Image (cartoon, coloured by chain):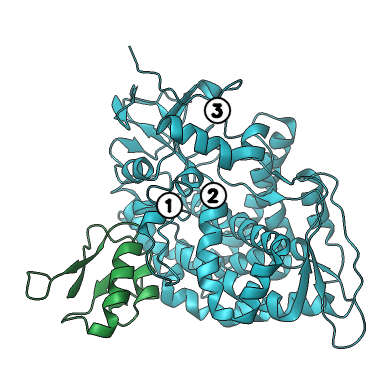
Amino acid sequence: MSNEPAGTVPDAPFDHHSPLYADTWPDLTTRMREACPVTRTEAWGGYYAVTTYDEVRRVLGDDGTFSSRRQIPGVTEPGCPAGIVIPPSPEESVPIEYDPPENRPYRKLIDPFFSPKASRAWGPFVQRVVTECIDGFIASGRGDFILDIANPVPAILTCAMVGLPTEDWRPYAEPLHAIVYEPPGTPDFERVVEQMQTMLAKVMGTVAERRAEPRDDLITWLTQAVVNGAPLDDDEIRSMLLLLLSGGVDTTTSLMGNAIHWLGRNPEKRDWLRADLSRIPQAREEFLRYFTPTQGLARTTTVASDIAGCAHASGRSGVHVAFAAANRDPCRVLAGRRGTGPVSNRHVAFGLGVHRCIGSHIARIEFDIVLREVLTRCRTTSSTKRTPSWVRHDRHRQRLGDHAHLVHARPAVGRFDAGLQRWTTCRCTWTRAAARGTHCAR
Amino acid sequence: MQVHVDTSRCQGHALCAMTAPELFDLNDDDGHATAVVGTVSTELEAEARTAEAGCPERAAIITAAGSDSS
């Protein structure tokens, strides 16, 4: 009855949470895409993975057929949510798990906090935070890029933009990273879900405080907002803040970590950037395309639908929209590039359509400042004896080596130490190490 | 040459304004773009083409001078 596409993965069904995906996604998704634009897998109850740029674009532009909602009347069963990740996340995120037009008033509420103009205004703050982070280790002559910069900066900035206390950033950052690394269905994942609940309870504590004593911040704005004629209730505010925290923290850490790691392994490119910092935006867009921190998100068919003309999905089919695969599709992304301008690269790392990543502007500003400061103030090296493995999740992938990428600070006087710090595993240990906050007192 | 933004497609990626800031204005609240009116000067034509090619939503559109555009 249905046409099963040829693009199934040999020896194992496609599973975006699998070690195979984590370790080999560029080649894996290329092989899938070359076989067929859509792959059927029976993992996680069965879903389709869309891997071409054109098809990703089509799916993301058709919210009516490919819904982001958790509960779709007439389609999903009660108690069996859908939503934008496969398997569904424990909590709803708003407005990313709404379809148009319902998403619109929520999106409009928070757009002004993240617009290009608003994001530019955060530049000086980011500069101060990055400077402080580097100042914290530079005298010692040795630092760790992930622990000292890539972890704190996005967390501190996101807390600040939202209105959470920035000196307290670690309890927010840790579960936000860990929820990305731990594959669903494991005991570790369940533990992290609990950590997230604890963290969100903390966030709601701040919400209650702002209701009592308003400030000039986003949380206060949400407590005073009216949508569809009614104030936002606590559940809605919680879901919106969860999304902003989820979107702002691990993704940017991942992008920065991957970029610095890559530059350490490609020192001629690092030196090329350092020679002319105006090249950073061009490199940044390529890092976004190449690493795609949010590897993919899901949609659910609301009706029986053809996908890419080679699979016929029944209604209520999960579809993994593989941004990372689309970003490697030579037929489309690179064809869109012309000239040597910094943004001729038409990648989909920030998604497409109505749910385009609201943080795209601040993410770029943040990344550029970090890269500029690191290239200017620090020497970077990297050494890996084994191939680093990708950390797994369907929303994000963060590539952490078995050896940490080490940033050697360049002090005004004195000599460097060429030491190297090991992480023993790329997942839990990283998170625990981040929580320990080694290296500097902050 | 003129540039035009299809507002039904624009999602505020703002790549057009990054590429060709002289040709596109961004809304303060949501970063959605509008094109400056008038003819694109010769020295900005290459930027205009890059902006058109670089828009992920295909919302930045170049039209020939004198054709209908809003």
Image quarter for residue A44? top right
Cα separation, mark 2 vs mark 3, equals 18 Å
- As displayed, is residue A422 above or below residue A345? above
Cα separation, mark 2 vs mark 1, equals 9 Å
In this view, the residue in front, A171 or A145, is A145
Residue B11: x and y, percent? Answer: 33, 60
Q: Which mark, by number, is residue A14?
A: 3
Q: Chain ID for label 1? A: A
Disc 3 marks a residue whose amino acid type is Phe
Residue situated furthest top in the rendering: A1
Disc 2 marks a residue whose amino acid type is Thr
Chain shaded green: B
Residue B58: x and y, percent? Answer: 28, 58
Q: Chain ID for label 3? A: A
Secondary structure of the residue carrying tag 1 is: loop
Residue A332: x and y, percent? Answer: 37, 50
Secondary structure of the residue carrying tag 3 is: loop
Q: Residue at x 32, y 69 (%)?
A: B51
Q: Is residue A293 left or right of residue A359?
A: right
* The C terminus of chain A - image quarter: bottom right
